[in-house]
Image (cartoon, helix red, strand yellow):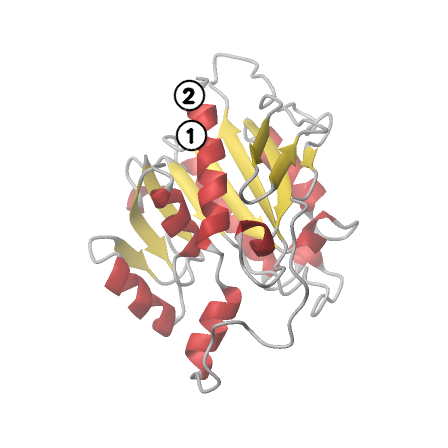
């Protein structure tokens, strides 16, 4: 599939998805100059844009998957002001929604954010309603970096949305389990979401992976003297190994079509 990455950062999401064999990254949208320099090094053939608010469907012909970790400042427990998706930064989610509606070739969305997205004011309910009204089936889970071998917890919520054919009423994404004794992964479906004119009838939430490391006082493996641009990019990055697991799930869904 042709991947369009929004809010790309240093490319953790697309790196994991590509490693899982989901597709190849053709476009990236990222405003930070340092991050764009990292992206240019690792994806020299991809086309890059700076402002998600100025791009349109015509910029991404044939895009099949949109991935993006939209800003969390108005959602995060550390910085949240209670505004959620109405906030100045986190409201950029609606740019994802705009492109998902206007790019007719899109088959999947992969969204990432902090776990407080699922809180009362976090905005998950609004996201599910928007995706359902745009004819996407949805599932989500809170996954941790610790569950793929990292020495820090780093919980993040991931949302997978699959577009429903306009000539069908659609079915919820099927229940599934993935187990790995080596890494002690355990994902299990407990609820489901399906498109409807009034939003999803129910939400699908997966139990978090059980294996988590303790909270460390410092970032493991990062030198003590790191420039701020690099440290900020690392802090905001999606762990590729977690995105890889999300990519495997997308492959399952594609295999069931």
Marks 1/2: CA–CA distance: 6 Å
Q: Position of residue 115 (x, y in %)?
A: 68, 53
Under tag 2, what secondary structure? Answer: helix
Position of the N terminus by quadrant: top left
Foreground residue, 18 or 168? 18
Say if 206 sits above or below 88 in the image: above
148 to the left or right of 18: right
As drawn, which residue projects farthest toward the right? Answer: 120
Q: Look at 69% across and 70% down and name the residue there.
A: 79
- Judge the density around disc 2: few (<14), some (14-19), many (≥20) Cα neighbours within 10 Å: few
What residue is shown with label 2? 255
Foreground residue, 96 or 119? 119
Residue 37 appearing in the image = yes
Q: Look at 57% across and 31% down and name the residue there.
A: 178
As drawn, which residue projects farthest toward the left? Answer: 45
Residue 101 appearing in the image = no
Q: Position of residue 104 (x, y in %)?
A: 39, 31
Which dot marks residue 237? none
Under tag 1, what secondary structure? Answer: helix
Say if 7 sits above or below 4 in the image: below
- Judge the density around disc 1: few (<14), some (14-19), many (≥20) Cα neighbours within 10 Å: some
Determine whether label 1 and label 2 are within 8 Å by CB.
yes
Q: Look at 58% across and 17% down and name the residue there.
A: 171
- Count of numbered marks: 2
Which dot marks residue 251? 1
Q: Position of residue 3 (x, y in %)?
A: 35, 42
As drawn, which residue projects farthest toward the bottom? Answer: 225
Position of the C terminus by quadrant: top left
Residue 9 occupies quadrant = bottom left
As drawn, which residue projects farthest toward the front? Answer: 182
Residue 201 occupies quadrant = top right
């Amino acid at each position: 599939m042709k991947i369009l990455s929004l809010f790309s950062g240093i490319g953790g999401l697309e790196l994991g998805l590509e490693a899982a064999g989901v597709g190849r990254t053709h476009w990236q949208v990222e405003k930070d100059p340092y991050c764009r320099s990292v992206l240019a090094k690792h994806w020299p053939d991809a086309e890059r844009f700076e402002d998600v608010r100025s791009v349109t469907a015509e910029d991404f012909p044939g895009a099949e998957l949109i991935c993006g970790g939209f800003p969390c400042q108005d959602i995060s427990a550390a910085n949240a002001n209670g505004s959620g998706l109405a906030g100045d930064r986190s409201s950029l989610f609606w740019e994802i929604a705009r492109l998902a509606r206007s790019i007719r070739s899109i088959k999947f969305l992969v969204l990432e954010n902090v776990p407080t997205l699922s809180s009362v004011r976090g905005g998950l309910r609004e996201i599910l309603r928007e995706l359902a009204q745009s004819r996407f089936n949805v599932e989500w889970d809170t996954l941790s970096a610790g569950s793929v071998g990292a020495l820090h917890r780093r919980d993040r919520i991931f949302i997978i949305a699959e577009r429903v054919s306009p000539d069908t009423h659609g079915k919820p994404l099927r229940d599934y389990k993935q187990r790995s004794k080596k890494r002690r992964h355990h994902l299990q479906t407990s609820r489901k979401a399906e498109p409807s004119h009034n939003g999803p009838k129910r939400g699908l939430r997966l139990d978090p992976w059980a294996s988590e490391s303790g909270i460390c006082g410092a970032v493991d493996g990062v030198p003590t003297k790191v420039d701020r641009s690099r440290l900020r990019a690392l802090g905001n990055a999606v762990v590729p190994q977690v995105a890889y697991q999300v990519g495997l799930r997308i492959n399952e869904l594609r295999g069931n079509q």
